[in-house]
Image (cartoon, rainbow, N blue to C red):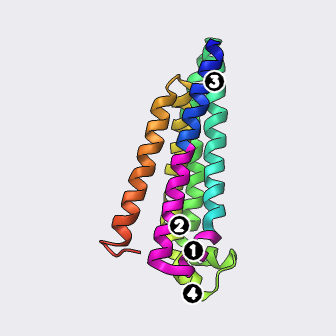
Amino acid sequence: MRLQKQFVKYVSQNVMGMIGISCYILADTFFISMAEGTNGITALNLVLPLYSLIFAIGAMMGVGSAIRFKILRAKKDANAEYYFSNAILFALLIGAIFMIIGGLFPGQLVRALGGDEEIVRVGTPYTRIFMLFAPCFMWNHICNAFVRNDGAPSVAMAATLLSSLFNIVMDYVLMFPLGLG
């Protein structure tokens, strides 16, 4: 019975965090449609697979290294301590590739994904900004996995929900009152 309660606690709080992420993606979509119209939504949908790839790499490194850390720590293996720092370092290295491509070639990237000249014009700033923060997205998933595996799924859920709420508020503020697109 205790194991079942723990399982429900971990799963339900993880699901709540994922709902928060879904809400901010929905808000991004809504605000972009209001600020940029159909071209903005088209640009967003063209580059969304890149965000998904960044998310997947971060989640893969986070979950994998957090599990290996937990197993080795339970075995009192001194090498367990390297899993977190290695995950952070590799996220920086892999994220740097996304940063370079996004920082130097965002227009070419949007064009390669199928954007015409108007979509490239609208999508280039968005692509550049989110790709420059690729390591941060990956670090978020790594830290979230380690915190959850360290017995604090409530902290991981709260951090995810608060960051999603911050993203929604800042989307609105940056796009409308400040007019930054």
Please, what is the three-letter code of the amino acid marked with disc 1?
Answer: Ile
CB within 8 Å, label 2 to label 4:
no
Three-letter code, disc 3:
Phe
Disc on res. 7:
3
Looking at the picture, tell me which residue is in the foreground, 154 or 66.
154
Q: How far apart are marks 1 and 2 (CA)?
A: 7 Å
The image's mark for residue 118 is 4
Q: Earlier in the sequence, mark 3 or mark 2?
A: 3
Q: Residue 29 carries which label?
A: 2
Tell me if label 1 and label 2 are in contact, CB under 8 Å: yes
Q: Earlier in the sequence, mark 1 or mark 4?
A: 1
Taking the image as drawn, is residue 125 in sight?
no
Residue count near mark 1 (Cα–Cα under 10 Å), binned few <14, some 14–19, many ≥20? many
Q: What stretch is highlighted in magenta?
A: 18-46
Labels 1, 4: front one = 1
Q: In this view, does 170 lie to the left or right of 15?
A: left
Quarter holding residue 60: top right
Contact check, label 1 and label 4, Cβ < 8 Å: no
Front: mark 3 or 4? 3
Q: Which residue is drawn at 63% across and 70% down?
A: 45
Name the N-terminal-most of marks 1 and 2: 2
Q: How far apart are marks 3 and 4 (CA)?
A: 48 Å
| Residue under the image location 59 percent in, 20 percent down | 6
Numbered mark located on residue 41 in the image: 1
Q: Is residue 35 above or below residue 14?
A: below
